Image: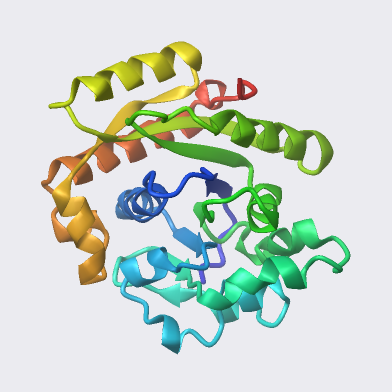
Amino acid sequence: MVENKKITRIISLSNQKGGVGKTTTAMNLATALAACGNKVLIIDFDPQGNTTTGLGIEKTQAKTNTYTLLMGESSLEETVCETSVPNLWVVPSTIHLSGAEVELVSVIARESRLKEGLEPAQGVYDYVFIDCPPSLGLLTINAFMASQYVLVPLQCEFFAMEGISQLFQTIKIVKKNLNPDLEFMGVLLTMYDSRNNLASQVEAEVREHLPGQVLETVIPRNVRLSEAPSHGVPGLIYDVKCSGSQAYIRLAAEIMRKFSNPKSTTKKEAA
């Protein structure tokens, strides 16, 4: 780990709906930021462990993981794994994490276990991304407690907005009662198919419903991004020239611009 102190920005990627591009975004946005010289850490906080395998880490070899970190059985330094991508590390996940919500029910300060576990990351990494599970349970609450920002991937498909108000309400509750520093970074539109009129209609509807809260960059539906995890690498490593990879490079640039100009970072409450 690097000793130089720096500002560490912790960002949760969350949507209780599955299959919206959280993991794809976590891996590729992190890779793009790492390629710019940033030290980046991904916390795979989904028991399915798709980020872990997508980065080429064997779950069976991960003796320490997000479960052991959350339960206080391992430190962050003991849990972090190197990836094949320079400047990118991951805390792997296994199916054991699925039992954590039940095991933490009677634990004091159960909502802040991940925050405590991530304290050593402060000043070491430039960015920490938490890939949340597709639910609004105790794991996601832990992620929000540990974060400064929440980024919401939203697919450009019918019923895209369904259930999103519940997520926004959860963010507001956590901000009000548990983590006053939590900010809504915005919505990231994913799986955009330019051949489909519905996609452009969904984009227009979301931007109208959430003015000023939708990122400019839109991630297209892209076969090369879908193929990459089976090779154990992010899409940017698998095919940097494909439209999906290029979109994540633009997204990384947009996010770095936001942080270089703090006034532009989304601070509005979710609608």
Residue at 22% of width from left, 55% of height from top? 226
For the image, the number of numbered tags is 0
* Residue drawn at the location 41% of the way across and 30% of the way down: 160
The foreground one among 2 and 111 is: 111
Q: Position of residue 7 (x, y in %)?
A: 58, 48
**Whole-percent x and y of residue 149?**
59, 39
Residue 78 occupies quadrant: bottom right
Q: Position of residue 90 (x, y in %)?
A: 45, 68
Q: Is residue 211 visible?
A: no
Residue 62 sits above or below residue 22 on the image: below
Side of 129 relative to 31 (left or right): right
Q: Nearer the viewer, residue 159 or 150?
A: 159
In the picture, measured across the screen, residue 47 lies left or right of residue 146, that is left
On screen, 104 above or below 249?
below
To which quarter of the image does residue 119 belong? bottom right
Q: Is residue 214 visible?
A: yes
Residue 5: name its quadrant: bottom right
Q: Which residue is drawn at 21% across and 52% down?
A: 225
What color scheme is it?
Answer: rainbow
- Where does the image place residue 52, in percent across and percent down from the top left? 40, 70
* Foreground of the two, 22 or 180: 22
User: Quick one: quadrant of the C terminus?
Assistant: top right
Residue at 28% across, 42% down: 248
